Image (tube, rainbow, N blue to C red):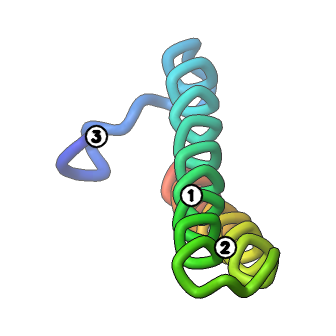
């Protein structure tokens, strides 16, 4: 990840589109899997059915969207 805004690739360059999209996809997938895994673990420990799995999926999606929004906003400046 670049240290300063001056180190960011230009929006029209090929490194912007490929690396940025790959990073966004990976971050979204990781947050979703982490929320799902934590929810599955909590449901198993507390015997609560799919309650925490659903909460974990929602939290993972929300964190992924917020992270994507922050990253995209940095590149659009």
Task: Give how far apart the Cα atoms at labels 1 and 2 are.
Answer: 8 Å
Q: Could you tell me if the residues under marks 1 and 2 are in contact, i.e. CB atoms within 8 Å? A: yes
Q: Is residue 8 left or right of residue 33?
A: left
Residue 65 image point, x, y percent: 69, 64
Q: How many marks?
A: 3
- The residue furthest left is 3
Q: What residue is disc 3 on?
A: 1
Instruction: Give the secondary structure at mark 1.
Output: helix
User: Are the residues at dot 2 and dot 3 in contact (C-beta closer than 8 Å)?
Assistant: no
Q: Nearer the viewer, mark 2 or mark 3?
A: 2
Instruction: Answer with mark 1 or mark 3, whichever residue precedes in sequence.
Output: 3
Residue under label 2: 56
Considering only vertical position in the picture, is 25 above or below 61?
Answer: above
Residue at 67% from the left image edge and 83% from the top image edge: 47
Separation of residues labelled 1 and 3 (CA atoms): 26 Å
In this view of the protein, which residue sits in the foreground, 42 or 33? 42
User: Residue drawn at (51%, 35%), measured in percent from left and top?
Assistant: 23
Along the line of sight, the residue nearer the viewer: 39 or 66: 39
Mark 1 or 2 closer to N-term?
1
Evaluate if marks 1 and 3 touch, with contact meaning CB atoms under 8 Å apart.
Answer: no
Q: Is residue 8 left or right of residue 4?
A: right
Q: Residue at x 63, y 49 (%)?
A: 28
């Amino acid at each position: 990840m670049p240290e300063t805004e001056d180190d960011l690739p230009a929006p029209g360059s090929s490194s912007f589109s490929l690396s940025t999209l790959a990073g966004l996809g990976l971050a979204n997938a990781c947050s979703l899997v982490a929320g799902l895994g934590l929810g599955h673990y909590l449901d198993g420990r507390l015997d609560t059915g799919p309650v925490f799995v659903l909460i974990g999926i929602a939290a993972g999606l929300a964190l992924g969207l917020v992270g994507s929004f922050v990253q995209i906003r940095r590149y659009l400046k």
